[in-house]
Amino acid sequence: MGHRDKVKKLGRTKPHRESMLANMAMSLIQHRMIKTTEAKAKALRPVIDRLITTAKKGTLASKRQVAETLHVKEIFKKFYDEIVPQFADRDSGYTRIMKLGVRRGDGAPISVVELMIEKPKVEKDAKKKDKKTAKAAAK
């Protein structure tokens, strides 16, 4: 029975599980999308959501709490400079898990975890302006 099971143990000890999820969180922040098993993806989602929610507070204490998980300084800076500002107006739902199928070797269900970052609309507007100015220059 799965009553009162708050943590998915993933067949690992607590320190191993925590470091694995921290490494996966850093990979997700660095690459914005990672491919992993479905169970690990579901275990990673609350870790990322907690990191972003804590980081949005912007206090020194919150930065130190986030730094406990994000050990690499470059990823920590990228997280605060690029990722967190894009979620400023969003309350929750920072990640998306999409199922891909099963792994060929052992049949494990594979999923993709990605950050729900909106693509900048400035690029599309700039392309439209470039086309309009090119047409105007041609006339």
Image (spheres, rainbow, N blue to C red):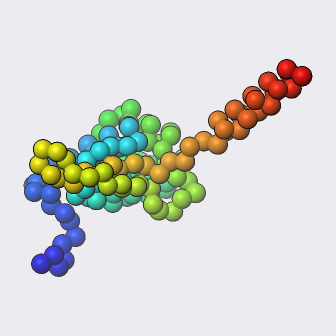
In the image shown, does 61 or 138 lie closer to the viewer?
138
Taking the spot 28% from the left edge, 59% from the top edge, the residue there is 42
How many numbered dots are placed on residues in this image?
Answer: 0
Position of residue 111 measured from the top left corner of the image (x, y, whole percent): 29, 51
Residue drawn at the location 36% of the way across and 34% of the way down: 73
Decide: is 7 above or below 101: below
What x and y, as percent, mark residue 27? Answer: 32, 40
Q: In this view, which residue lies farthest toward the right?
A: 139
Q: Quadrant of the C terminus?
A: top right
Q: Nearer the viewer, residue 137 or 85?
A: 137
Quadrant assignment, res 28: top left
Classify residue 81 as left or right of residue 6. right
Residue at 48% from the left image edge and 44% from the top image edge: 83
Q: Residue, x 44% and y 56% (percent of image)?
A: 94
Q: Is residue 107 left or right of residue 65?
A: left
> Where is residue 113 shown, x and y percent of the image?
35, 50
Residue 93 placement: quadrant = bottom left
Query: Which is nearer the eye, 58 or 11?
Result: 11
Indicate the position of residue 64 as horizontal and vertical percent values: 37, 48
Which quadrant, please, contains the N terminus?
Answer: bottom left
| Whether residue 63 can be seen here | yes
- Inspect this view and state whether residue 58 appears: no
